[in-house]
Image: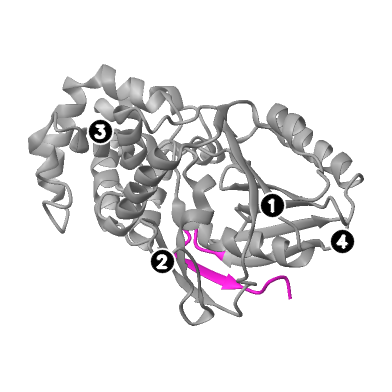
């Protein structure tokens, strides 16, 4: 039996087809349509096949790790946001509510050819995202540590991107029937479909907030801030509104964010400090680090866990992928007491939280 003509044949084609399905299933039919336009051009050996040649030899897992389709998807949105291509911008939300694949192809493919060098340069760098809604599930981890230790928190984030989630204490959270937390006047309002019991929602004292990233985004630079917005799917206006609010807040408050290798930074900064609970945290970044970097962090945390005391506890809070599960896991490790537990299963963008609290 022969393979249907429209069946993806290569790992590169498979990842574009798969990412289009993911976008559609996660409420972004517009992004799915843009990816399908690129996929058709890719199959035909067009400009997207040419610029994506450096990724062509990766297997499917390699494509996933590289987030290959997200790169040109971000480029197209960035170009629409830039004001440099009005015909493309006119085909993007908020100017339209539904994608017109034929019109997109007629405009996007020629633009990609004309701007091939710019496109190639854009996709050479890994995507940078800073999904602030992920703090909805992380909030429960922070408040759990505060409630169980009774101490103020040192909050240390790796893979912090633009550092927007360092400002999580300044957001307002609506957990539906589970309650709310934070400043009602905050410009960043975080909500989501919360199921299960509420986490501890008492006050949390923060004495330190800092983070690192291998290639941090400087939101003071308009081009870098626009690139960050570009990786938000264009038809998900609520996500764009949240990131706009978070950027504005961070420009006002400032951020303690540095460029650093995650392992070296953890080794330098993450250790028990008397009178505080030290929390290392991260979201949707662990998979992108080399195994050697992961190993160094794990070894350091094990060494520091052995030094943790009731007066100087240590926590490791993460929101990361689980093999074979479409949802992600929020995991908390707390030393010297508290062990390791899965607090929740969550939507990759934070839109839903299935909270158990480790029960």
| Residue 201 highlighted magenta (yes or no) | no
**Where is mark 1, residue-wise?**
153
**Residue tagged 3:** 44
Sequence-wise first label, 1 or 2: 1
Circle 1 sits in a helix, a strand or a loop, which is it? Answer: strand
The answer to which of marks 4 and 3 sits earlier in the sequence is 3
Q: Is residue 11 visible?
A: yes
Q: Which residues are magenta?
A: 346-359
Q: Which mark is residue 184?
A: 2
| Of marks 3 and 1, the one in the foreground | 1
| Residue assigned mark 4 | 337
Q: Residue at x 45, y 52 (%)?
A: 132
Q: CA distance from mark 2 to mark 3?
A: 52 Å
Work out whether mark 3 precedes mark 1 in sequence or the reverse, and give the earlier one. Answer: 3
Residue 141, given in percent of the width and then of the height, sits at 65, 61
- Mark 2 packing: few (<14 Cα in 10 Å), some, or many (20+)? some
Location of residue 52 by image quarter: top left
Return the mark for residue 115.
none
Regarding residue 328, the answer to whether it shows in the image is no
Which of the pair 160/287 is nearer the observer? 160
Counting residues from the N terminus, which is met first, the one under dot 2 or under dot 3? 3
Left or right of 318 in this view: 129: left
Q: Is residue 106 left or right of residue 174?
A: left
CA gap between label 2 and label 4 equals: 34 Å
Magenta region's main secondary structure? loop
The quarter of the displayed image where residue 230 is located: top left
Q: CA distance from mark 1 to mark 2?
A: 22 Å
In the image, 48 versus 348, the foreground residue is: 348
In this view, the mark in front (4 or 3): 4
- Residue 32 location (% of width, % of height): 29, 52
């Amino acid at each position: 039996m022969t393979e249907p003509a429209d069946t993806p044949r290569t790992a590169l084609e498979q990842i574009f087809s798969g990412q289009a399905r993911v976008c559609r299933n996660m409420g972004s039919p517009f992004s799915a349509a843009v990816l399908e336009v690129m996929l058709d051009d890719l199959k035909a050996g067009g400009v997207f096949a040419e610029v994506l040649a450096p990724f062509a030899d990766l297997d499917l897992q390699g494509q996933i790790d590289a987030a290959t389709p997200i790169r040109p998807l971000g480029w197209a949105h960035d170009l629409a946001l830039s004001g440099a291509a009005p015909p493309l911008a006119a085909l993007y939300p908020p100017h339209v509510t539904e994608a017109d694949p034929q019109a997109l192809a007629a405009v996007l493919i020629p633009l990609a050819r004309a701007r091939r060098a710019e496109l190639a340069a854009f996709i050479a760098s890994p995507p940078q995202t800073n999904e602030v809604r992920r703090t909805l599930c992380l909030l429960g981890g922070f408040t759990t540590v505060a409630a169980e230790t009774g101490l103020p928190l040192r909050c240390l984030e790796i893979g912090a991107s633009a550092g927007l989630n360092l400002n999580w204490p300044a957001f307002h959270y609506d957990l539906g029937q589970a309650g709310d937390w934070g400043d009602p006047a905050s410009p960043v309002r975080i909500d989501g479909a919360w199921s299960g019991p509420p986490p501890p929602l008492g006050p949390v004292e923060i004495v330190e907030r800092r983070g690192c990233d291998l290639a941090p985004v400087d939101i003071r630079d308009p081009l870098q801030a626009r690139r960050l917005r570009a990786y938000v799917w264009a038809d998900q206006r609520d996500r764009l509104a949240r990131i706009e609010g978070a950027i504005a807040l961070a420009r006002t408050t400032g951020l303690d964010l540095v460029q650093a290798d995650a392992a070296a930074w953890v080794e330098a900064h993450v250790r028990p400090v008397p009178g505080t609970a030290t929390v290392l945290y991260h979201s949707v970044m662990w998979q992108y680090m080399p195994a050697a970097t992961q190993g160094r962090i794990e070894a350091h945390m094990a060494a520091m866990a052995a030094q943790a005391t009731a007066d100087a506890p240590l926590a490791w809070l993460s929101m990361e992928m689980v093999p074979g599960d479409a949802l992600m896991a929020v995991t908390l490790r707390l030393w010297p007491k508290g062990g390791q537990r899965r607090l929740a299963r969550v939507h990759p963008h934070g839109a839903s939280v299935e909270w158990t609290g480790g029960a």
